[in-house]
């Protein structure tokens, strides 16, 4: 899959690009079945809500992970994911910084406050925001279901000094201070809700401001995120680095896989 010049221009301008119907129902069903299986795994990279419901499953792309999945291994390398990432980063040599599946339980799936991903990835030893994240909706992405929101053009602000939030949700993280967010929202277009059918994807810049609300619907909402990074941007050594399930130590360039691997139980060649 190749992005058009207009799509590349849109990504550079807005900081994100929506790709409707990127994956077929059979492919999404395979990924959904894998998430059901992985939900029964007990591992450090499986994060739960205060209620006990699963919130995030990390490192699903890596065959050496406790949460390994052939389907997600193939997803990370398939042409519809890897080729567009190579295009927006202008580099053929990419690796997966981390993969994660965010699962919002029906009725009480928690929020993700406004933040930039590079706001805390810089602390992992990365010199530049040379990443792109591709999110794939496994369930319908709706506003009542707590969809992702992106502020167009906010990636051009660069990294904003974040603050540590260990009270808002069960998953402590770095967030943009409220006063700064209000100032930014006054000067930018309204946040864009990323909605669509299962198989919809969105690519976004690591400095774009994004958030998601509570899942108030009767359906669980599962989304998958693959974070691609330039091999040349591999992290420098830092004291007490975060574990491999959130900060990969595998920096070899990904080899392009094939689309057929998404619907058969076979691992694409590394």
Image (cartoon, rainbow, N blue to C red):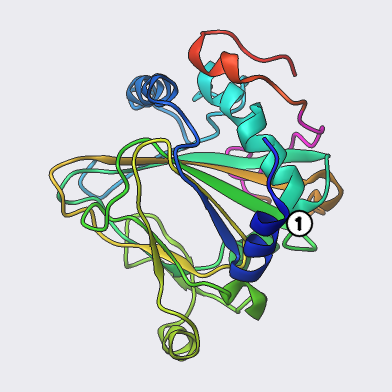
Q: Is residue 239 visible?
A: no
Q: In which quarter of the image is residue 181?
A: bottom left
- Considering only vertical position in the picture, is 152 above or below 64? below
Residue 60 rendering spot, x and y as whole percentages: 53, 29
Q: Is residue 101 visible?
A: yes
Q: Give the range drawn in magenta.
A: 242-254
Left or right: 181, with 89 as reference point: left
> Mainly helix, strand or loop, the magenta region?
loop
Q: Which residue lies furthest to the right in this view?
A: 232
Residue 169 rendering spot, x and y as whole percentages: 32, 60
Q: Residue at x 33, y 67 (%)?
A: 167
User: What quarter of the picture does the C terminus occupy?
Assistant: top right
Q: Residue at x 18, y 40 (%)?
A: 219
Which SS class for mark 1? loop
- Considering only vertical position in the picture, is 20 above or below 89? above
Residue 130 rendering spot, x and y as whole percentages: 75, 57
Is-magenta flag for residue 249? yes
Left or right: 258, with 213 as reference point: right
238 or 176, nearer to the observer: 176
């Amino acid at each position: 899959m190749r992005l058009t010049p207009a799509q590349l221009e849109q990504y550079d301008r807005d900081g994100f690009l929506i790709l409707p119907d990127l994956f077929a129902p059979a492919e999404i069903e395979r990924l959904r079945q894998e998430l059901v299986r992985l939900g029964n795994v007990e591992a450090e990279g499986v994060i739960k809500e205060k209620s006990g419901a699963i919130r995030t499953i990390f490192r699903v792309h890596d065959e050496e992970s406790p949460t390994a999945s052939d389907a997600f291994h193939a997803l990370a390398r398939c042409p519809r994911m890897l080729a567009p990432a190579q295009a927006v980063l202008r580099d053929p040599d990419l690796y997966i910084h981390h993969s994660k599946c965010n699962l919002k339980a029906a009725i009480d799936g928690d929020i993700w406050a406004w933040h930039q991903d590079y706001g805390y990835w810089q602390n992992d030893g990365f010199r530049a925001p040379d990443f792109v994240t591709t999110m794939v909706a496994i369930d319908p992405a709706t506003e009542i279901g707590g969809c992702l929101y992106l502020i167009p053009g906010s990636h051009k602000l660069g990294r904003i000094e974040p603050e540590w939030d260990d009270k808002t949700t069960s998953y402590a993280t770095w967030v943009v201070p409220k006063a700064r967010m209000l100032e930014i929202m006054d000067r930018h277009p309204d946040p864009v809700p990323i909605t669509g059918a299962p198989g919809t994807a969105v690519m976004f810049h690591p400095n774009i401001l994004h958030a998601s609300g509570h899942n108030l619907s009767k359906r669980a909402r599962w989304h998958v995120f693959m974070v691609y990074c330039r091999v040349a941007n591999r992290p420098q050594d830092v004291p007490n680095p975060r574990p491999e399930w959130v900060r990969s130590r595998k920096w070899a360039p990904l080899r392009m896989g094939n689309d057929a691997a998404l619907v058969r139980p076979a691992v694409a060649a590394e």
